[in-house]
Amino acid sequence: MQGSPPANEGYMIAAYVVTAVIVFGYALSLLARARKALRDSK
Amino acid sequence: MGSLESARATTRRGMTISAVALLGLVAVYVMALQFTPIERFQGAAQKIFYVHVPAAWSALLAFSIVGIVSILFLWLKDERLDRFAAASAEVGLMFSCVMLTTGPIWGKPIWGVWWQWEPRLTFTLFLFFLFIGYRTLRSALQDPAERARFSAVVGIMGMLLVPFVHLTVYLFPGIHPLPVVLKPSSPSLPPEMLRTLLTSFLVFTVLSLGFTITRYGMALLADAEEARHAG
């Protein structure tokens, strides 16, 4: 008798959302700062 | 003028690498969520592993680079090395945030608790705070030469902690799982899971590289601007 896997998809979704928020949030912040630095250096 | 152009080119190169790696991250999400099987005992929560482990790798890699570049700075006294170390520390902290949030989200359904004061987790948190201290120190010191010298010492201290963090699971066995890839024997994962994990490792490494080069280029731009105004 083989049981089904535990139902914990919510945790997986939460982890992937948190990762996306941190990584893409940092990327957007970096992009904005880099574009400003490039603009100011002209 | 040449250094300004070079700084601009470095920043742009970093932005391009970061953009490509971000597309790679989207591909990792699709691979992990759609094309990788659900593990029988841990369920869907096991898939957190495809972002948590590469984020941990990227954070520890970035902190190791801070230490190595800091040693080179103390030896060669080249300010660009100090700027690169600072850039790598910022990126390492960002990946640490991913590692320290996804870890407890995995821990709750698997261990039943969000956090355990066991050696791996405790030392990782300590390393995170050490690099928060590194950033704080850099903000607090006004003299650039003093800032570079003192923060290099803290960066080297942080790097010394990295192998210790990796080996805690062997030195002080707790509830944290043992490595499945970064270990002396061959990886212990089914091929489809290993493929996703290795792709994620590659994407996170390139992402780390792209972010660090962008941040480094920005620091060089600031230096070149300062030199232009001073001259």
Image: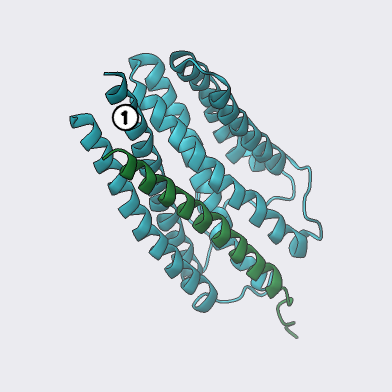
Chain colours: A green, B cyan
- Mark 1 crowd level (few <14, some 14–19, many ≥20, 10 Å Cα): some
Q: Is residue B12 above or below residue B68?
A: below
Tell me which residue sits at (78%, 59%) in the image.
Answer: B111
Tell me which residue sits at (73%, 58%) in the image.
Answer: B107
Tell me which residue sits at (47%, 28%) in the image.
Answer: B67
Circle 1 — which element? helix
* Residue B19 visible, this angle: yes
Q: Residue A16, image x and y in percent? A: 59, 65
Residue at the farthest left position: B2
Q: Which residue is mark 1?
A: B225
Q: Residue B182, image x and y in percent? A: 50, 48
Q: Is residue B136 above or below residue A30?
A: above
Res. A5 image quadrant: bottom right
**Residue B150 versus residue B136: which sits nearer the camera?**
B136
Residue at the farthest right position: B112
In the rendered structure, the residue with mark 1 lies on which chain? B
Quadrant assignment for the C terminus of chain B: top left
**Residue A16 versus residue B15: which sits nearer the camera?**
B15
Left or right of B163? Residue A37 is left
Quadrant assignment for the N terminus of chain B: top left
Q: Is residue B114 above or below residue B225?
A: below
Tell me which residue sits at (37%, 15%) in the image.
Answer: B75
Q: Is residue B41 above or below residue A32?
A: below
Q: Residue A27, image x and y in percent? A: 46, 53
Left or right of B4? Residue B182 is right
Total of numbered circles in the picture?
1
Q: Amino acid at mark 1?
A: Glu
Res. B113 image quadrant: bottom right
Q: Residue B216, image x and y in percent? A: 37, 37
* Residue B184 visible, this angle: no
